Amino acid sequence: MDERLSLTELQLIIKDSLYMALPDMYWVIAEIAEIKVNYSGHCYLELIEKQNDNVSISARIRGVIWSNRYRFVKPFFENSTGESLREGLKILFKAKIEYHEIYGLSLVINDIDPAFTMGEMAIRRQQIMKRLEQEGVLTMNRDLDFPTVPQRIAVISSANAAGYNDFITHLRENSYGYVFYTALFDTPMQGADTQAGVLRSLDRIALNTDNFDIVVIIRGGGSQADLSWFDNYDIAFYITQFPVPVLTGIGHEKDLSVTDMVAWQALKTPTAVADFLIECMVRAEDQLHETGRAIIDMSSAIVEQNKNLVESSRLKLIPLAKMSVSEFRNELSDIIINMINTGKEYLLKARLIPENQRSRLVSGSVSCLSVNKNSVQSVKKDFSSGYEVFLGIKRNEIAGYESILKVLDPENVVKRGYTITSLKGRIIKSVNELSKDDVIDTRFRDGSVSSKIV
Amino acid sequence: MAKKEFSFNQAVNEIGKILREIESGEMDVDRLSAEVKRASELIRQCQKKLKTTEEEINAIFKDLS
């Protein structure tokens, strides 16, 4: 062969043949192995296809998205999928084959279909969920009892993440004055280190589960927050096995990751997690007040009942006591009359007998009389002192009831800082008794206010 | 943590027990005053736990993180 070609001529022939053979745009599926955007806004990619083992590479080509397209393709893709274009992502793109004499073969990408990537992610998510379900662990964290007071919190987040600071500030500045204790386990929340980092932090928390009521996994939102780092079997499995409830605030508006789905509760943002925790505390305190109020109500009723009982006994007791006293008095006067009569009889008899014996008889009957008088007096004394003791006991009982009543008196309850809420003079014990636009009166220690339900 | 630990849950259970006893009518009047006092003390402690910082726990949490 005598004809010789310059390298450029050869390259032009290749180029022409390629353009002739492959004139169209093609829809191609590939994985992004590398992606870079240069200073002028052009996006350069390394596209690959992996074999079934997910490791060996069976095809590779360079790709480029020119800045005038990239400006539109990138936000559209990210808004649709909630994922940024990044390494490891599988995409379906429309491309034209380009051949350059110096740079060789590449694909010029014109468009990327977000629906394909979303589908891929959904399939992956489903596979992980299915595996967790088959292993029977899917709901294990969700089945844990949530602590009444979630006060001691292990935080898995990145120390300088905006989301972390939002969370801490929100907890600290809660308007109820609740105290929370947080320990940050600093963890990368994005990128290839996410899995190892989260697992390491969970390991460290697991050594101290007695010190924690709950674990929260949080990070800031925004389009930079790729959800798929949390579509991870290992992280999800560890959470299902964790002995303490896990809450997530991974900051994703559109979708839930697998991590969210196995967590005890998934919330959209770190601030929402903080709100959730504060609400738990409010519920616990409300419950406390409600029980306290019920105890006061019930006890007041019991005291009231007993007071009535005591009062009615007292009313019965007085006439009864009076009656028995007057009966005793009658008996006494009978005895005295008897004695006087007996004495008189003796004296009359004595008149009939000789003088010497008479004086003996008189003195005998006088002494007899005085003995009897003494015994009557002592009986009288015993009776009245017994009666005093009896009345004293009853008096003390009544005083005891009175002191209980004092403790439970609404006046004193209000003094201790409780308030009494009423509607048209009727005391309100449940929110269900109230409806919109009702004007309620709240009674405090030092006065009342009226407020309207909105 | 040598200090005897106050448990919110235990306190809530005890308060609930007192309430149930009063509700069921098993509470006699002689004990009523003491039990109501006990319940209000427990409620006070629970509230304190919700709203007062315990230096001890803070220190532990600093060590852990």
Image (spheres, coloured by chain):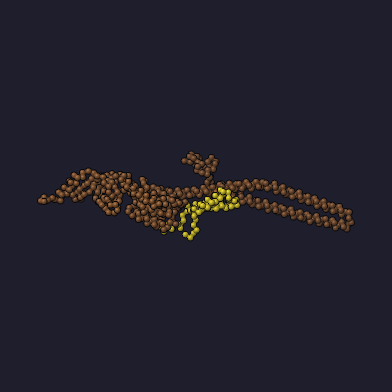
Q: Spot the residue most to the bottom.
A: B2
Residue A6 place in picture, x, y as percent: 13, 50
Between residue A392 and residue B10, name the one nearer to us: B10
When asked about the image quadrant of residue A353, the answer is bottom right
Residue sitting at the far front: A134
Left or right relative to A332: residue B21:
left
Between residues A20 and A155, which one lies in front from this camera angle?
A20
Q: A175 or A108: nearer the eye?
A: A108
Q: What residue sits 19% from the left and 50% below the top?
A: A102
The location of residue A83, given as percent across then percent down, is 32, 48
Chain in yellow (letter): B
**Residue B60 visible in the picture:** yes
The x, y position of residue A143, in whole percent, is: 43, 51
Residue A79 picture location, percent across and down? 32, 45
Q: Horizontally, is A21 left or right of A400 in the view?
A: left
Q: Is residue A443 left or right of residue A376?
A: left
The shade of chain A is brown
What's the residue at 26%, 50% (across, down)?
A47
The residue under the point 76% across, 51% down is A332
Asked which quadrant contains residue A75, the reply is top left
- Considering every residue shown, the one lying at the far top of the view is A437
Q: Is residue A66 visible?
A: no
What number of labels is visible? Answer: 0
Q: Give the residue displayed 68% in from the left and 52% down from the top.
A: A390
- Left or right, A323 with respect to A96, comes to right
